[in-house]
Image (cartoon, rainbow, N blue to C red):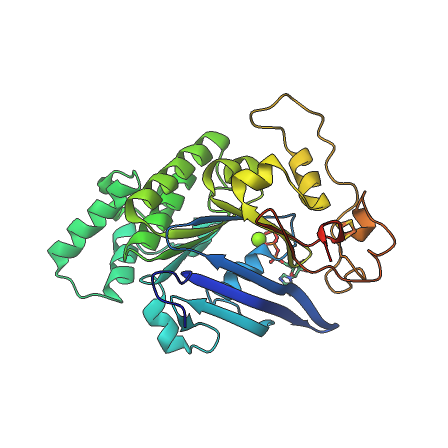
Amino acid sequence: MIATATRPLLQVKDLCVDYLTESGPLRAVDRVSLDVARGEFLGIVGESGCGKSTLLFAIARLLSAPAEISSGEIWFDGKDMVSMDEDQLRHLRWSGYSVVMQSAMNALNPVMTIAEQLGDAIQAHVRMRDRQLRSRSQELLKVVGIDPVHLHSYPHQLSGGMRQRAMIAMALALTPDLVIMDEPTSALDVVAQRSLMVKIKQLQREFGFATIFVTHDMSLVSHFSDRLAVMYAGQVVEVGQTRQVFAAPKHPYTVGLMRSFPSISGPLQTLTGIPGSPPDLAHPPSGCRFHPRCPKRFDRCPGEEPDLYSNDQVLVRCFLFDDR
Ligand SMILES: Nc1ncnc2c1ncn2[C@@H]1O[C@H](COP(=O)(O)OP(=O)(O)OP(=O)(O)O)[C@@H](O)[C@H]1O
Ligand code: SF4
Ligand SMILES: [Mg+2]
């Protein structure tokens, strides 16, 4: 048993998630293992369809049919999340961990004011007098940079950026230890995105919550995440300190991803990207899943599956880093 102080806040071990489709199971998350420490900001990147949202939904226990966790473990603050029933999960949602999804328009209730929704989220866990609840809600809106006059607005009366901020206010209402975010800024323009990210980071420092943040935007993760996990075809292919992964990407896919984005600080380089497209997860390639697109593949790659190998404190799923 690991002592509470040193134990990661979240531990995901060998997690597999399948979509049970009519043509058979499709494994969208394949043996993913990840740790998140208290107060840590973990970024997850990878091309569309690689399983990022499915992984977040599994961790938050929000999967619905036809998706199911088929094996593996999820430990949150020492509690076994996989075996929890709905009742136990209800106790943990909002207060232990909360979730901010890509589109607040879908997550917020269109026929309830922001005040009513904040109130519902808070009162599901703690009883408060009306006056106390109002002042707590006003305070929360101020924290995320929204004028409290908007407490009595309906979601459609707010701008996209304000709705995302309102979602974040709800996610923070009960000061959870972990906030799970699936592309919370992607619906916004670049300026609004930046300002919301700066706010999220500031709140994280202030409240000390840990974050798992999924994005397509390499520039965002490079600025805001402590650690970075790169996913490809349902698997984690590289995970390490963000600074280190950016300075010296190891997995050929990560190298390709980095080349797909303009360098943030260095000289301008041609955006070569990664030729080809991600595989159909119903029929993943044999051996290393990246081999059909990999510029570094060699004879071992199509026939054998690489493990995650440790190299300079970074884990890499590529035979080039197999020292054995
Ligand atoms: N309802 C579903 N039924 C069957 N397969 C699904 C379903 N939803 C997702 N999938 C499959 O799971 C895979 C992972 O999807 P997921 O939404 O987790 O990817 P993602 O990395 O979040 O993509 P994006 O960046 O576009 O949001 C997809 O390739 C898709 O084939
Ligand atoms: S294992 Fe082979 S195909 Fe896969 S990333 Fe490494 S070199 Fe490329
Ligand atoms: Mg997604």
Q: Could you tell me residue 312's position as x and y percent? A: 60, 46
Q: Is residue 51 above or below residue 82?
A: above
Q: Could you tell me residue 173's position as x and y percent? A: 28, 54
Q: Nearer the viewer, residue 79 or 157?
A: 79
At a point 36% along the width and 65% down the height, the residue shown is 93
Residue 159 seen by the camera = no
Q: Is residue 118 left or right of residue 274?
A: left
Q: Is residue 118 above or below residue 163?
A: below
Q: Nearer the viewer, residue 218 or 148?
A: 218
At a point 25% along the width and 52% down the height, the residue shown is 115
Query: Residue 198: which quarter of the image?
Result: top left
Quadrant in which the C terminus appears: bottom right
At a point 29% along the width and 38% down the height, the residue shown is 145
The number of numbered badges drawn on the structure is 0
Residue 81 seen by the camera = yes
Quadrant in which the N terminus appears: bottom left
Q: Could you tell me residue 17's position as x and y percent? A: 60, 68
Q: Is residue 298 left or right of residue 126?
A: right
